[in-house]
Image (cartoon, helix red, strand yellow):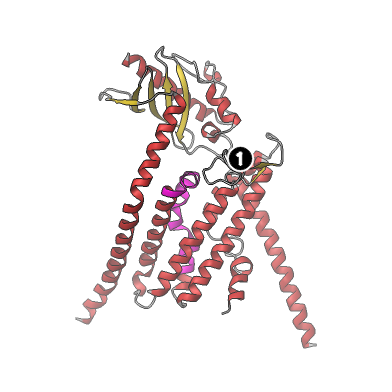
C-alpha cells in the first residue's frame, strides 16, 4: 500500500466523514467557526495518529477478547493528554470546544481505525493512516466551518483572525473578517440542524463526484478491452 | 493449568496497559496542573474585575441557610460585592458573576460558564455588540429583576427567553443576598 493511495483514501475515496460517515456528532456540533474546526481537526489528527501507532506497536500482544477495552484505555489516555495540554496552553480553544474534546474518546473514527486498520498493519503504515485520515477529517471540518460561518454568521476565520491585539490570534478574541453585514446571515445554519444541512450537501457532492469518476474509470476499462 | 492462564493473561495485559496509561497521565497532569489552575484563577479575577472593579476581593463565608443557587460571594475592597450564581438555563447550568454596588444596585454581570444554544442563548456570554447590549441592561437594576414578558424591564434575547430569565433570576438572587449581607 503506497502513500499516495493512502492519502487519496483518507482525503477522498474513504474519507472518514463523507464516505465512512463516522464521527458525525462532533462534526456537526462544533463546525461553526474556523477556530473550532481547525482546533478539533488537529486534535483528532494528533490523537488518531498516536493511537494508531501505539495500537499497531502492541497489536501482537493484545488478546482478542479484551482488544476493545485496551483500545479504549489507550484512546482515553491520549485524549486526556491532549485535553490537559489544550487547557494549559490554548485555554480559548479548550473552552470553545468544551465537552467535545473529552468526547473524542468515543469518536468512532479513532476506535474504527484501531479496529479496522492499525490492529492489523505495521507501525509505519498505521502512522501514515492516522495522519491521512486525520487530514481528511480536518479538511471536511474546515470546509463545513467555512460554509456555515460565512452563510450563518457572515464572517470568515472567526476565532483566529482579526483578534483584539493582533491579526492572527489564539486567545479567542478573533472576530473574523466580515463578508456579509451583521444580521443578514442565515442564523439557522449555525444551529445544529444547519450542520445536518451542510453535511448532507457536502456528502451529496462527494457521492456525485465519486460516482462520476467511477463511471469514467469503467468506460476507460471498457474501451481498453474493446 | 493452561485454561487458568488463558483467563488470567488478557486481564493482566489489560492491567498493564491501564497502568502504563495511568503513569503517563500522572506525569502530564503534574506538568500542566499549576498552569491550568493559574489560568482558572486569572479567568475568575478577570470576570470579577469586569463586573465590579476593585483592587482585591475577600471571600465571604456563606451560612448553611444561604440560597442554593449562590456559589460564592466576595466583598470588594472599597465597597460592594461580587456574587457567583448558578441558575438553570435552557441547555444546562448558567454560571454568572454579578457585581453589586454598595447601594444595592447591579454594577454589571458576566456569564462565566454556560452551554446555551449557539447564536441564541449563547449571545449572553459572548464578547459581541449584541452580548454587551444584553448584559448592560442589568447595570443599575435593583430589587427584583425580570424580563419584559414577566413584567420586568429586561429585553430578552431573541429566541432565548429561558436563558434571559435564568440570568434575571440569578441577578435577583445576588441582589437579595447582598441586601441580607448588609
| Residue underneath mark 1 | A175
Magenta run includes residue A103 = yes
Please provide percent x and percent y for residue A4.
Answer: 61, 75
Please provide percent x and percent y for residue B139.
Answer: 50, 19
Residue at point 61%, 59% (across, down): A139
Farthest-out residue, left: B1
Would you say the magenta stretch is mainly helix, strand or loop? helix
Q: What chain does badge 1 belong to? A: A
Residue range in magenta is: A88-114
Q: Is residue A48 visible?
A: yes
Residue nearest the observer in this picture, B51 or A77: B51
Residue nearest the observer in this picture, A54 or B49: B49
Residue at point 58%, 25% (across, down): B133
Residue nearest the observer in this picture, B111 or A119: B111
User: Counting other residues with Cα less than 10 Å from the Cα at mark 1, is it few (<14), some (14-19), or many (20 or more)?
Assistant: many
Quadrant in which the C terminus of chain B appears: top left
Magenta run includes residue A79 = no
Amino acid at each position: 500500500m503506497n502513500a499516495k493511495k493512502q492519502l487519496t483514501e483518507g482525503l477522498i475515496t474513504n474519507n472518514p466523514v463523507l464516505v465512512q460517515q463516522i464521527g458525525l456528532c462532533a462534526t456537526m456540533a462544533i463546525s461553526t467557526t474556523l477556530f473550532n474546526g481547525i482546533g478539533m481537526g488537529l486534535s483528532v489528527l494528533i490523537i488518531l495518529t498516536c493511537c494508531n501507532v501505539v495500537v499497531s506497536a502492541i497489536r501482537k500482544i493484545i488478546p482478542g477478547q479484551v482488544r476493545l477495552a485496551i483500545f479504549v484505555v489507550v484512546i482515553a489516555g491520549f485524549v486526556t493528554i491532549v485535553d490537559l495540554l489544550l487547557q494549559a496552553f490554548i485555554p480559548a480553544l479548550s473552552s470553545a470546544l468544551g465537552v467535545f474534546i473529552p468526547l473524542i474518546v468515543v469518536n468512532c473514527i479513532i476506535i474504527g481505525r484501531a479496529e479496522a486498520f492499525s490492529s492489523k498493519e505495521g507501525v509505519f503504515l498505521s502512522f501514515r493512516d492516522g495522519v491521512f485520515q486525520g487530514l481528511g477529517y480536518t479538511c471536511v471540518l474546515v470546509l463545513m466551518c467555512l460554509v456555515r460561518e460565512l452563510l450563518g454568521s457572515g464572517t470568515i476565520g472567526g476565532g483566529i483572525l482579526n483578534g483584539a491585539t493582533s491579526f492572527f490570534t489564539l486567545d479567542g478574541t478573533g472576530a473574523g473578517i466580515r463578508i456579509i453585514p451583521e444580521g443578514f446571515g442565515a442564523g439557522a445554519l449555525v444551529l445544529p440542524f444547519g450542520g445536518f444541512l451542510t453535511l448532507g450537501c457536502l456528502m451529496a457532492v462527494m457521492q456525485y463526484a465519486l460516482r462520476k469518476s467511477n463511471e469514467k474509470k469503467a468506460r476507460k476499462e471498457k474501451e481498453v478491452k474493446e | 493449568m493452561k485454561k487458568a492462564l488463558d483467563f488470567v493473561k488478557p486481564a493482566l495485559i489489560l492491567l498493564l496497559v491501564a497502568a502504563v496509561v495511568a503513569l503517563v497521565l500522572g506525569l502530564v497532569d503534574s506538568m500542566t496542573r499549576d498552569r491550568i489552575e493559574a489560568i482558572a484563577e486569572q479567568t475568575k479575577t478577570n470576570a470579577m474585575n469586569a463586573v465590579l472593579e476593585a483592587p482585591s476581593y475577600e471571600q465571604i463565608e456563606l451560612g448553611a441557610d444561604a440560597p442554593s443557587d449562590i456559589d460564592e460571594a466576595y466583598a470588594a475592597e472599597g465597597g460592594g460585592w461580587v456574587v457567583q450564581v448558578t441558575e438553570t438555563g435552557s441547555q444546562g447550568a448558567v454560571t454568572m458573576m454579578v457585581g453589586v454596588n454598595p447601594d444595592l444596585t447591579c454594577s454589571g454581570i458576566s456569564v462565566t460558564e454556560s452551554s446555551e444554544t449557539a447564536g441564541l442563548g449563547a449571545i449572553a456570554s459572548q464578547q459581541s455588540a449584541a452580548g454587551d447590549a444584553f448584559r448592560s441592561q442589568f447595570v443599575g437594576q435593583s430589587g427584583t429583576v425580570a424580563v419584559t414578558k414577566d413584567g420586568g424591564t429586561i429585553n430578552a434575547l431573541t429566541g432565548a427567553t429561558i436563558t434571559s430569565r435564568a440570568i434575571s433570576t440569578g441577578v435577583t438572587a445576588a441582589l437579595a443576598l447582598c441586601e441580607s449581607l448588609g
